[in-house]
Image (spheres, rainbow, N blue to C red):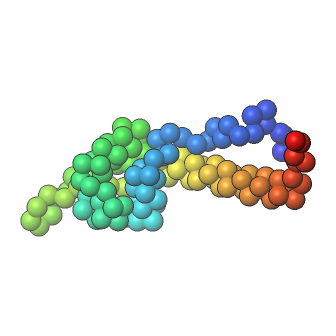
Amino acid sequence: MSEAREAPFSYPGLERIFHERGRLAICTCLIAHSEGLSFTELAAACDLSDGNLNRHVHALADLGIVTVEKQRATGRPQTIYRITKRGRQRFLAYVDELEAVVRDVHERSQRAAAHPKLATT
């Protein structure tokens, strides 16, 4: 049995680092591609400009959520981005909290529709 929270709409698991469209896209994409993606692949998959991708990736890397690895293969050097184990755990916990928000919205809106308050005039 779960305990009722004092502030049921506070959603403490919503981390600001993920709560931005670009970072949400980057983390979702990197979870789907555990082998990692190049800068170009990640930018295309997330529909981000080079500058936006760079800014968001550095913010995520500073917190240990993603890793940035420079590789030198045949031809030009390539940067590969991967989500870390801890980053994956944090992001999945964030997604769980988002799912709680969605459940609450649906449950409470259905209850409100079923039991509308009487309007006073």
- Could you say where residue 50 lies in the image, as x and y percent from the top left? 24, 53
The outermost residue toward the front is: 121
For the residue pair 114 and 58, the one nearer the viewer reads as: 114
Is residue 76 toward the left or the right of residue 89 in the image?
Answer: left
Q: Is residue 106 left or right of residue 92?
A: right
Instruction: Please indicate whether residue 99 sits to the left or right of residue 38 in the image.
Output: right
Q: Which residue is located at x 35 percent, y 65 percent?
A: 45
* Residue at the (79%, 32%) spot, across then down: 6
- In this picture, residue 79 sits left or right of residue 2: left
Q: Residue at the spot x=30%, y=65% of the render?
A: 44
Percent x, y of residue 5: 79, 36
Image quadrant for the C terminus? top right
Q: Residue furthest left?
A: 75
* Residue 81 in view, yes or no: yes
Q: Nearer the viewer, residue 27 or 64?
A: 27
Q: How many marks?
A: 0
Residue 82 in picture, x, y percent from top left: 37, 55
Residue 38 seen in the current view:
no
Q: Position of residue 92 (x, y in %)?
A: 56, 53
Residue at left offset 64%, top offset 38%: 12
Q: Nearest the camera: 102 or 36?
A: 102
